[in-house]
Structures are given as C-alpha cells and as structure tokens.
Image (tube, rainbow, N blue to C red):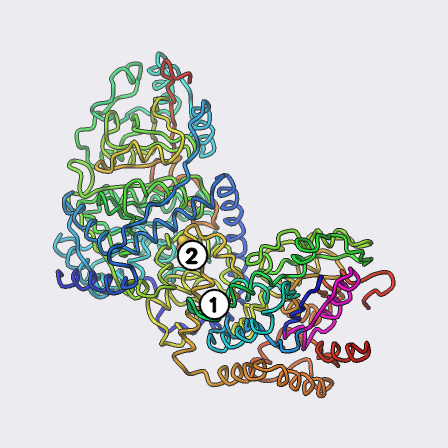
Amino acid sequence: MNRSRERILARVRAALADVPRDEEPAPVAVPPGRAATDGLVDLFADRLEHYRARPVRVGAADLPEAVAAALRRRGAGRVVVPADLPEEWTSRCEAELVADDGLDPAALDAVDGVVTGCAVAVAATGTIVLDGGAAQGRRALTLVPDYHLCVVDAARIVADVPDAVARLSPVRPLTWISGPSATSDIELNRVEGVHGPRTLEVLIVSSPGTGA
Amino acid sequence: MSRTFLGMPPFPKAAEAAVADAQLRHNLHRATRTIRRTRGRAVAEVDDWEALRAAGAAIKDRTLRHLDRYLEQLEEAVTAAGGHVHWAVDAAEANAVVTELVRATGHREVVKVKSMATQEIGLNEALAEAGITAYETDLAELIVQLAEDRPSHILVPAIHRNRAEIREIFLRAMADWGRPAPADLTDDPRALAEAARRHLRERFLTAKVAVSGANFAVAETGTLVVLESEGNGRMCLTLPETLISVVGIEKLVPTWRDLEVFLRLLPRSSTGERMNPYTSMWTGVAPGDGPREFHLVLLDNGRTDVLADAVGRQTLRCIRCSACLNVCPVYERAGGHAYGSVYPGPIGAILTPQLRGTASEADAALPYASSLCGACFEVCPVAIDIPEVLVHLRERVVEQGGRPGERALLAAASWTLGDERRLAWAQRAAGAVRSLVPRRLPLGPAAAWTDTRDLPEIPAEPFRDWWARREKEDGR
Amino acid sequence: MRIALFVTCVNDTLFPRTGQAVVRLLERLGHEVVFPAGQTCCGQMHYNTGYRRDAQRLAVRFVETFADHDVVLAPSGSCAAMVRDNYPRLAPAGSRLGRAAAEVAPRVLDLSELLVDVLGVTDVGAYFPHRVAYHPTCHGMRLLGLGDRPLRLLRAVRGLELVELPDAEECCGFGGTFAVKNPAVSAAMGWDKARNAAATGAEVLCAVDNSCLMHIGGVLRRQRSGMRVMHLAEILASTEKEAVR
Ligand code: SF4
C-alpha cells in the first residue's frame, strides 16, 4: 500500500511538471459574506421560516416556559437532553427528561424528541451549527429522535458562513443544520422529512444588551 | 445491484433512443426546469457571485498546482487525529482495500452514503463478489438500487423517474431488500419519503460499518466534509462503529478557512438552497461521538492523467454540483444514461474521456455530445470552461486517427477554404447544380441533416460574385 | 467610416442576401464598405470539430487578409466569437499567429456591436411592418456578450412589433458538426426552438447568425410553418422603398 502512495505522489509530481518548483501557493482574494447589521436576528428568523423550522423568539427569563410550551405543543412525553444542558432551561417541563449517558440508537429512537443548545448560528442561511460543546451532546442525539428543539442564544448568531467558519474549530465534529431533514430526489422538488428529525423548532433567546 | 454502463452504445445512438422516449423527456424537462429556476433565485441573491466563483476556481487551482504537498499534509493531519489513510492507484485497488477493511470488522453488511467515487469504481459490485451487501441509503440511490437501474444524474441519480414510477418500484422491490413498502402507498412525494424512512430505519440503527465519499477534505486540518439533505449521511457517518471514506485526490482544499467559499457556492448551485439541510464535518475520530475507527481511501483512478493535461486540468476543480447538467439542453433531451458513465452531462462529457481515455468508440463520442452552447460554463460555480475542454478533447480524438469519412470531408473543406479562388469555383459548381439538389438526401451527414430539416436553397450567385459584378458595373 | 466586411463562408455561399443587406445598410448610413477578396473562412467548423491544424491555417489566412483594417464586420455571431475568443487559444504562445491574432481579434465585430458601440446608432432608419421574435444565439449571447444590442436595434425599427420568445436563451441545437454527429438531439432541440418560435405568433424569427437560422429555418420549412427566418441585417436594411421580399 505504501507503494501506491509513492506511485500516486510521483504521478502527481510528474503531472505538475509545468508548475515551477519554487512556486508558492498564491493567496486568493475572497469576497466577504453578508455584512453584520442590526437585523441579524430578524434575518435568521426569516430564513428559518423559509425552511419551515418554526422560530420562536423569547426573552431570557421566559425560556423555561417556552421550552415547556414547545414540548407540550409537540406532545413530547419523553425527551433526551445532553447531560450538561442547563437545568434551568427545562425547569418548567412536564415531560420526562432522559439525560444522555451513551444511549444506544434504539433507545434514542424510542424518545419523542431532543432539546439542545448550539455553537453558532448563521443568519444569511438560517443555519444552526452544533459542535458537541456545551448543551449540545454528541451527534446521534440530534439525529435519531424525530423532533429537535434547539435553543439559540441571539449572541451566537453571526451574519454569514465565513463568520461561522472562523468561529468554529474543525477539531470537533460539526453538524450544520439548515431546517428539517429534506429531499429533492423526487422530481427535484423539495419535500421535508426523511431520515433526520422531521420537525425542527428553534427558540431564539434575546440576551440583554444584544438589542435583539 | 445496480447495472453498470459496460457495453452501452455510443452517445449518438443511446441519445436517439432517449429522445424517442416521451415519458423520459417529460420527466427530465420538468425536473430540470424546476431546478434551473430555484438555482437562479438562490444565485441572484448573492451580490458578488462572480467574485465568489472566481475565488472558488482560484482555490481549486492552487490546490491542484500543489497537490502533492496537500496530499501529504492531509495524510498527516488525518493520521494525527486517529484516522488511517490508504492510497489506491485504481478502482481495483480501492475496491480491494475497502473489501479488506470491511472483512476485518467481521461484518457482511455496509450502509452507504451517496458517493460518486464509489460508483465510479463499482464498489457495490466488488463488495457483492466478496459476499458483502452494500445498502444505498440516499433516496435516489435507493430507487436506482431497488430498480436495478443505472444512475442518470450526479445529484439526483433517479431524476429520470417520476413519482408514479418510484411508487411502483417501492411496491415491487422494497420487500426484497428489507421492510416492504406499505400496500396502500400513494405517489405523494411525502408518502414516498416516509416509506424510505421506514424501510431504512432499522438498518441505520443496527449498522456497524459505513462507506461514504466526501465533498471536501481539508489538507490543513484533516477534516472531511459531506453535504446532504436527508440525514442518511448523518446516520451513516455517526451511528456505525467503522467508517470508510473513499475520496478522489482532487477533493482537497488547502485550509479550513477555504471551506467557507465552497459552502457558499455548492448548495446554491446544486439544490438551489441557501444551505443544504445537513453538513457533517469530522476530523479523524472523536472519543464518545461517532465511529471508533475511521479509514480514508485516497483514490487516483485516472485523476493524475487529467492533472497532467494543462487544458484538461481544470476539470478537477469540479465540486459535483450538477448545475451544468441541469442547464444543459443536450442532457435534458438525451438523459443521463446516454453518457455511458456515472458522470453524465457536460461534466461527464469532459471527465469520462479523460479518466478512461478516448480509445473506445463510446468514449471518443463523448466530447462531441455538445453543441458548445456554453450554458454549462456560465453556471459552473468553479468556472470550468467546459466548451474549451470539449474542443481540446476533440482535438485529441482527431489526432488518434480513424474516421476516414469525416476526415476526408473536412480535408476537402479545408482545401476549398484554403484559397478564395478554390472557394469561388466550388460555389459556382454548387450553383450550377442547385436546381438538382433535393430537399432530402439519402446518405451520410446529408441524410442526418435532411431526416428532420430541409436544406437551404443554394443561391444563384454567391456574395463574392455579386460584389465583383457590382464593382464592375460601378466602374470602380 | 471604412468598414471591412468579412462576410463569412456560410453567408458568402448560402446567404448572399445577408451580405448584400449589410452593404446596403452601411452605405445608407454613409459608410464605406470594402470586401478584401482573399477572405474565405474563419476556421470555426474545423476548430470546433477538433481539426486544429486546419483551423490554424485558416486563422493565419484570416489575420493576413484583415491585418490592415481597423474595423472588421463579421455578420455572424459565432464567426466573430471564433476570432475573438478562440484565435488566442489556437495560437501557440508567442507565435506569429498569436501576435497577429491579438492585433486583429479585438477589431472584429458583430453587426449589432458595430452599429451600437462604434457607429453609435440604434435607429438605423429601417421600416419593417411585421411581427418579429428574436433568438439570441449562444455565441452571440455568451461569448460576445451582445446583451440587448440587437433588441435595441429592432425596437427602433418602424412598423416592427417585437414579441418575446419563450426559453429564448436555450440553444437551437445547431452546433456546427453537432447537427450531423448527433442528429437526434440536435433535431429535438431545433423542434423545441421552432415550437417556441411558432407559439409567439411572429411572422419572422430573427437572429445574428445564419447557421443557427439555417437549422431552425430547415425545421420550420419541414413543418410547413409559415414563419420565416431572417438575419438581423436584412431587417435593418429594409426601408419603405426597398423592403426585402
Ligand atoms: S463541472 Fe461545474 S457545474 Fe458541472 S458539476 Fe462540476 S462544478 Fe458543477
């Protein structure tokens, strides 16, 4: 197998005979993304609507009630949460909370939903990024249950994709989520809901001082 | 098992059959119109799309010009993050590597995320020979697999099927592969998606080994990236214990920050969305989250030949968005199968003959499967000048000889056009017999024209004779 | 202004009316037209089919023939594009052809470019009392970037009613040797183009390239459609006095 490695690298070098040996990779001018403006939260919410991801905006003090109300509306009796989800978020919930301690896929399939936070959110594309950090848990948590309730602190919303990439660390496993699971495989029309959570709801929490 | 493309007739013949298939043309017409509109809207929303496109092309060019060092960098980063890197010169070697890796796990079933690279090398067939069953999990791939069909589009391999056909396929074949489709299945796309969800659910939850490709591999960090919509990708990349990713050596981008350019270009070009529903990024293995073992198989399989051609090299910028297929008027009418490869449409017409060579009649016909209208170049998010590469490959085909009829005709044309007196003589000769030329001709290229179109009338006097006469009359 | 006409081999041989219309139009606008007699063909067919050396020979001939002319009119979008876009590619770097092509190529213009950009007219004083649809040919649109120049010229024609062509930007399927190498697809594209054209109810389908019009016109005639095809030059050359046909 090492032979193949050497063979491929030799072939690559031979193929690049026209590239001067001392050429250094040229820097590339990249146009910036959308500028950060005041309306980021509105934009983010608008984009989520577009994906039918049902954004709800709440003040920090109202978050526990909003989480409880969302789960009630959904009829979710048992929900899984990352072990480090702030207790306060679910303090008003009637649903049974299952803290993840390495549940197997079948066990995850048996719960009614999952509640998490997120690492970063992107206004221009309506994207939530999870990096397995605080209040997010491992990737399977937000994948197997059919309902995902995601709490997004407005302070975590950035304008565009370049800002998000700059904030994230690739050392962590990342999941970028833009709306519920969907497919365009039937006549190239978008249909929501295949393997991932078919319902995504987002609570946008305005933090004091962000003006959101 | 999907059928392979071996033994397909060359493009003009296959396309002729496709053009005659009214259902196929209707399906393709509808689907490509839909996606053209959505792509157009998504792209128009970005102010500096052209600059972004130029940046995408430049980053890919930079990668390709220094590919050796980026490959080594990627290998180092993946290894440092706990992954294993394998190198495969060709399809046979890649298939052998993957088969061996699957065998070593002791399992005989793998779940698959849609991947062009594994289709290109015929991995499913190779695994089947080794007694390993590969389950396609992307909805369109599932349709193709269940129907024992061939893929006809990069992004939506079952684009040639409409909802009614998909319903029939599900009813007929799902039971052979696992959970059957419900007997009362309708052709509502929502119901079809639900049937696929149920059919694959159990499989995902119990899968131990997954095989994927990748849209991007970041040399600097060793990060692999998969963009998808349905969540089947996340299932495969997250739940199994072992993950094997087969990735072409051209999929690299140099740095983590470079990625953002492609995350802005690809979804809008591909499905016409601001962002696709799910993008997964992983670097080696993450303790307590996802597979415990990760293998990256780096695939050459002809790519270094493409790299060696200064004009053809730009083909390797391709990020497989399929925008060029969706706007191509030839693809819309010929369908994907006519291209005789897993890579159909304009990108297929330039990539396949470079990967496989132009020795066979089928591969030599591909560079000619275009009217050179340039619609593909216009939409390509990494600005691949597809018409330029097509013409370049036509030159290669001409250089290899053969085709005596065409050669003689073009040589005669070249001789006639090489001198204005010879041209004038030929024009007058044609003018002299002009009343004898019928509207339909029986043979060769003339018949190919007159089967469907009338010939223009040959004028009594060519322009240059008119001009000369006028000059004389004017006494100039 | 003194304008060198590169009539193109297709127009010369099959569509002399277009060349004659160009001459009439430009002389009417007070310009002088010259016809360098050594001209034959730009080499497009050979280039596009992969016969590079033949194309090179024809390119050499072209640049020699037109070396001394400041403005060269090619009343065919694809021929103008061949010279401007592909001659640089056809010539090895630093070759004599390369240098000559770099000199001559930018001076080669399509009719709508010559009129609108160089001569600064959109109203050429034409009269054409018919309903017309315009088909933007691929090379005119994508390689030359003609934009709305032809439409502006047509809108200024008295009596002319311009109607919009559905799916106008889609290729007609001609594509040079493509039309005979892939006759089924080429014809399918041509028939769709003809159907869209017929749906406009126009009497005339207009374009800046007679090759494409030969293909679409061939389909229209086979369909016994009453619709005619006409080069832009012929419409612009028409006046009350000397209406074409
Ligand atoms: S060639 Fe360009 S447009 Fe076509 S699939 Fe590749 S990246 Fe997309």
The percent position of residue C44, horizontal first and vertical second, equals 55, 71
Q: Nearer the viewer, residue C228 or B16?
A: C228
Left or right of B395 on screen, residue C174: right
Instruction: Report the amino acid beneath label 2.
Output: Ile
Query: Could you tell me which quadrant the C terminus of chain B lies in?
Result: bottom right
Examine the rendered structure and indicate whether residue B47 appears above or below residue A206.
Answer: below
Residue interval drawn in magenta = C9-35
Return the mark for residue B384: 2
Q: How many marks?
A: 2
Disc 2, SS: loop
Q: Is residue B32 highlighted in magenta?
A: no
The percent position of residue C20, horizontal first and vertical second, equals 75, 70
Return the mark for residue C65: none
The percent position of residue C147, horizontal first and vertical second, equals 62, 52
Name the residue carrying label 1: C98
The answer for how far apart the CA atoms under marks 1 and 2 are is: 23 Å
Q: Are marks 1 and 2 on the same chain?
A: no
Asked where in the image residue B287 lies, by quadrant, the reply is top left
Q: Is residue B185 visible?
A: no
The residue at the point 36 percent across, 47 percent down is B196
Magenta-colored segment: predominant secondary structure = helix
The residue at the point 72 percent across, 63 percent down is C233
The percent position of residue A189, horizontal first and vertical second, equals 48, 46
